[in-house]
């Protein structure tokens, strides 16, 4: 199992609409072969006027499924967010491989 982690920083003025879009985006990702489930986290922030931070963990079956995504769908999926929100958000990504579950 591989975790494909996406960390998002979102400007507060678009946060409400971004969450709606992100929910749909996650569901589209889960329609892709090998993407089995997703966990969506929000960084707790008491000040509602500050930027929002979201972290998505996509549980991906194996390296082949993730590489197929990078080769065939990643550019289109990433461009969709840019088309909707431009520079009002940023994304950083990591790939995590489970070593041991305790």
Image (cartoon, rainbow, N blue to C red):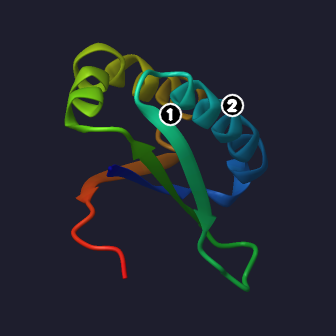
Question: Which residue lies at the image location 64% right of the left edge and 40% below the top edge?
Answer: 22
Q: In the rendered view, would you say 95 is above or below 75?
A: below
Of the pair 94 and 80, the residue shown nearer to us: 94
Q: Closer to the camera, 38 or 22?
A: 38
**Camera-nearest residue between 15 and 42:** 42
Count the marks: 2
Task: Look at the image and tell me in which quarter the C terminus lies.
Answer: bottom left
- Find residue 100 and report its image quarter: bottom left
Query: At 60% across and 64% down in the image, what residue appears?
Result: 41
Q: Which residue is mark 1?
A: 86
Indicate the position of residue 36 as horizontal and vertical percent values.
Answer: 50, 38
Q: Is residue 98 above or below residue 84?
A: below
Counting residues from the N terminus, which is met first, the one under dot 1 or under dot 2? 2
Disc 1, disc 2: CB below 8 Å? no
Q: Residue 35 — which label?
A: none
Question: In this image, 4 relative to 27: left or right?
Answer: left
Q: Nearer the viewer, mark 1 or mark 2?
A: 2
Question: Seen in the image, is 69 located left or right of residue 67?
Answer: right
On residue 24, the disc is: 2
Residue 5 in the figure: left or right of residue 54: left
Where residue 25 sits, quadrant-wise, is: top right
Q: Residue at x 22, y 18 (%)?
A: 71
> Could you say where residue 46 lies in the image, as x and y percent from the top left?
73, 86
Q: Helix, strand or loop at disc 2?
A: helix
> Percent position (x, y) of residue 61?
36, 38
Q: Position of residue 75 (x, y in %)?
A: 33, 21
Residue density around tag 1, few if under 14, some if 14–19, many if 20 or more, within 10 Å: few
Circle 2 packing at 10 Å, graded few (<14), some (14-19), many (20+), is: few
């Amino acid at each position: 199992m591989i975790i494909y982690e996406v960390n998002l920083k979102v400007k507060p003025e678009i946060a409400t609409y971004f969450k709606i879009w992100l929910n749909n985006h996650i569901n589209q990702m889960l329609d892709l072969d090998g993407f089995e489930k997703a966990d969506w986290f929000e960084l707790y922030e008491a000040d509602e006027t500050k930027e929002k931070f979201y972290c998505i963990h996509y549980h991906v079956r194996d390296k082949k499924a993730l590489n197929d995504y990078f080769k065939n769908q990643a550019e289109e999926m990433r461009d969709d967010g840019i088309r909707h929100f431009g520079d009002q958000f940023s994304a950083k990504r990591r790939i995590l491989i489970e070593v041991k579950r305790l």
